[in-house]
Image (tube, rainbow, N blue to C red):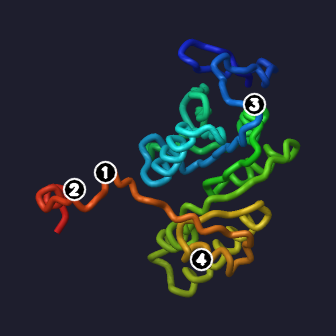
C-alpha cells in the first residue's frame, strides 16, 4: 500500500502503488525528535483501559515538543490523521466478531507504517500475534522494541477461561502461558508494566530489563470533592 494525500490532513492508503514514502503535506514533526510508534491489537475505539492509556499518552505528547507519538489503530479502513506531534495510522484489520476489536495479522501492514514513520522506538502493547508481527516487520529496519504488559494474560485469559477444568490442568495451562509470555518479552529492549505483581511474574519467567510504570489518576474527573452518594446509587453501587 501507499499513502495518498487528501483534504483535512488525512492520507488514504492506495493498494497496489509502490511509493511507501509519499509524505503527508501537513506533517510538521521534525527528524530531530524521538519517534515512538505504538502497536496494540487490544486497542479499540470503544475499549476501556487500553484505549484510555493510548489516548492519554497521545494527549501528553500532543502538548509537548520533545517527541512524536504515533498509534496504529486496527480499523475498518486505511487512513492517516496527522496532528503534528501525534499521528494516527488507521489500518484495515480483521474484525473479531461483534466484540468491537480487530486484529492485525499481516507483517506487511506494520512494515508499511514503520517505513513511513521511521520510529526510534516501537512499543508492543499486546501479547497475542502482535509481537510476531512486529518482529517480522522490524527485521530490516531495526528499531528498538519495548513491551508494555497491560494484561496478566496467563491468569486473566487462560486461567479464567479454564475455570471449569481440574485444578492440575488449570495450573499447567497457566504455567505454559507464562512460559510463552516469557519468550515473547525476553528478546525486547525493555518491558514496562503498571503492576508490580505482573512484573514479578515476568521476572520469575526469565524476563529482564523490567520497569515499573504506575498509572496516574485523572484528577480533573476523579477527586474527593466530586464524591456523590446519589451518583453512586444511580450507577448500581452499594
Secondary element under disc 4, as helix, strand or loop, is helix
Residue 221's disc is 1
Disc with the residue nearer the chain's start (4 vs 2): 4
Label annotation for residue 174: 4
Quadrant of the image containing the C terminus: bottom left
Spatial separation of the CA atoms under disc 1 and disc 3:
37 Å
In front: label 1 or label 3: 1
Disc 3 to disc 2, how far (Cα)? 45 Å
Which of marks 4 and 1 precedes in the sequence?
Answer: 4
Q: Quadrant of residue 113?
A: top right
Residue found 76% across the figure and 33% down from its top: 31
Q: Check the image and name the residue furthest to the right.
A: 140
- Pointer 3 local density, CA inside 10 Å: few below 14, some 14–19, many at least 20: some
Is residue 85 or residue 142 the one in the foreground?
A: 85
- CA separation, marks 4 and 2? 41 Å
Residue that badge 2 annotates = 226
Tell me whether circle 1 and circle 2 mark residues in contact (CB < 8 Å): yes
Question: Residue extending furthest bottom?
Answer: 168
Residue 77 in percent (x, y) is at 57, 27
Counting residues from the start of the chain, the first of labels 3 and 2 encountered is 3
Q: In the image, 75: left or right of 217?
A: right
Amino acid at each position: 500500500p501507499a499513502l495518498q494525500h487528501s483534504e483535512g490532513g488525512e492520507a488514504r492508503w492506495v493498494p497496489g502503488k509502490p511509493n511507501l514514502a509519499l509524505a503527508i503535506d501537513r506533517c510538521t514533526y521534525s527528524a530531530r525528535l524521538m519517534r515512538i510508534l505504538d502497536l496494540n491489537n487490544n486497542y479499540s475505539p470503544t475499549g476501556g483501559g487500553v484505549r484510555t492509556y493510548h489516548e492519554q499518552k497521545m494527549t501528553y505528547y500532543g502538548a509537548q515538543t520533545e517527541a512524536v507519538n504515533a498509534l496504529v489503530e486496527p480499523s475498518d479502513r486505511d487512513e492517516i490523521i496527522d496532528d503534528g506531534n501525534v499521528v494516527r495510522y488507521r489500518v484495515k484489520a480483521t474484525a473479531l466478531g461483534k466484540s468491537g476489536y480487530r486484529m492485525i495479522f499481516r507483517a506487511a501492514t506494520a512494515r508499511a507504517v514503520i517505513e513511513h514513520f521511521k520510529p526510534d522506538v516501537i512499543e508492543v502493547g499486546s501479547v497475542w500475534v502482535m509481537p510476531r508481527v512486529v518482529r517480522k516487520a522490524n527485521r530490516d529496519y531495526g528499531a528498538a522494541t519495548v513491551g508494555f504488559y497491560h494484561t496478566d494474560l496467563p491468569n486473566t485469559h487462560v486461567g479464567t477461561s479454564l475455570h471449569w477444568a481440574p485444578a492440575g490442568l488449570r495450573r499447567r495451562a497457566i504455567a505454559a502461558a507464562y512460559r510463552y509470555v516469557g519468550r515473547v518479552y525476553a528478546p525486547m529492549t525493555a518491558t514496562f508494566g503498571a503492576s508490580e505483581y505482573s512484573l514479578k511474574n515476568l521476572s520469575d519467567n526469565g524476563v529482564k530489563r523490567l520497569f515499573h510504570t504506575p498509572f496516574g489518576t485523572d484528577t480533573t474527573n476523579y477527586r474527593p470533592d466530586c464524591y456523590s452518594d446519589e451518583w453512586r446509587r444511580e450507577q448500581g453501587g452499594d
